[in-house]
Image (cartoon, grey):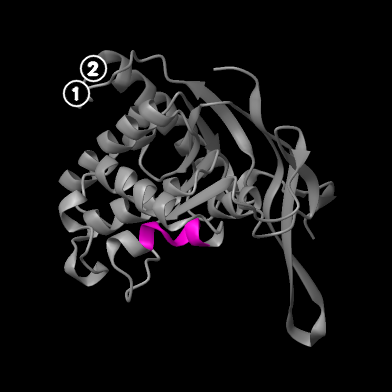
Amino acid sequence: MSENKISIENACKYFYGKERRGAASKFVAIRNVSLDVREGELLSIVGPSGCGKSTLLDLLAGLEPLSDGAIYIDGGKVTGPDLRRGIVLQGYALFPWRTVRENVEFGLEIKDAEKKEMKETSQHFIKLVGLEDFADKYPHELSGGMRQRVALARALAYGPEILLMDEPFAAVDAQTRETLQEELLHIWEETRKTIIFITHSIDEAIFLSDRVAVMTSSPGSIKSILSVDIERPRNSDRATAEFSSLRREIWSLLQNDAARGDEIEQEYCGEKAV
């Protein structure tokens, strides 16, 4: 690990709507989030439902503008999307009319890569996710786990420096989920991409990550950041004393936040709730 790849400084995001009688209302999704992510780090973010985890990922991707604060990548301010950041979502988002190979090549087409480069690169990443025998299949011919592998291969193929992953394994069965977790670690160890991984699963966060950031309930902010000092490579045994201790600590942070949620006076990006 070296210098910070990503720096989030007092990031706030709020949305405006209309209440009855035409009065304006403000909903604050995240409040004063500050977080540094090191080059080559795999960092997971956990938190209660609705705490703004996905909103934070959208801000990192440049898909939503900040309401306040700033996000920097390699010292440059994020002002919109770019090809340095790849995104993998829960819903696969594959093109049904394209084969596995054609889906993986999509980002390379946007970069105007030559046909030879597209073929060689897509073959490499299709093999990396274990789908070389399915390169000419269409998404409807694949299982959910296989479709998620295609989505991962597509995100990797055009060479992003950062992977932003929003609960990518939530829609598959438990056995497939653990297999995909192990495959992601294998890919990360080979590529050393900087990865931010959103999940509701404490076990998944611990198994994958160098550090785990725990968010508060809405409006979301960073409550604590815990190092995962479990030796790599990690096996699938999640019943060790180290693993169990860290699981209890994260669970306690989440439970304490939920219990205190109604008692906390919410301060919205420097303003108090009204």
Which circle marks residue 237 in the picture?
Answer: 1
Left or right: 205 as drawn, with respect to 13: left
Q: Let me know if residue 166 appears in the view.
A: no
Left or right: 224 as drawn, with respect to 245: right
Q: Which residue lies at the image location 68% right of the left edge and 60% below the top edge?
A: 64
Of badges 2 and 1, nearer the viewer stands 1
Foreground residue among 264 and 18: 18
The residues tagged by marks 2 and 1 sit, at their Cα atoms, a distance apart of 7 Å
Magenta stretch?
Answer: 103-109
Q: Quadrant of residue 98?
A: bottom left
Name the residue carrying label 2.
240
CB-based contact (under 8 Å), mark 2 and mark 1? yes
Q: Which residue lies at the image location 37% right of the left edge and 66% below the top edge?
A: 94
Q: Which residue lies at the image location 65% right of the left edge and 20% below the top edge?
A: 3
Amino acid type, residue under disc 1 in the picture: Asp
Look at the image and say whether residue 184 sits in the magenta stretch.
no
Q: Which residue lies at the image location 64% right of the left edge and 52% below the top edge?
A: 82
Foreground residue among 246 and 183: 183
Compared with 77, 102 (above or below) is: below
Image coordinates for residue 18, horizontal then vertical, percent: 75, 79
Q: Quadrant of residue 55?
A: bottom right
In which quadrant of the rendered image does the N terminus lie? Answer: top right
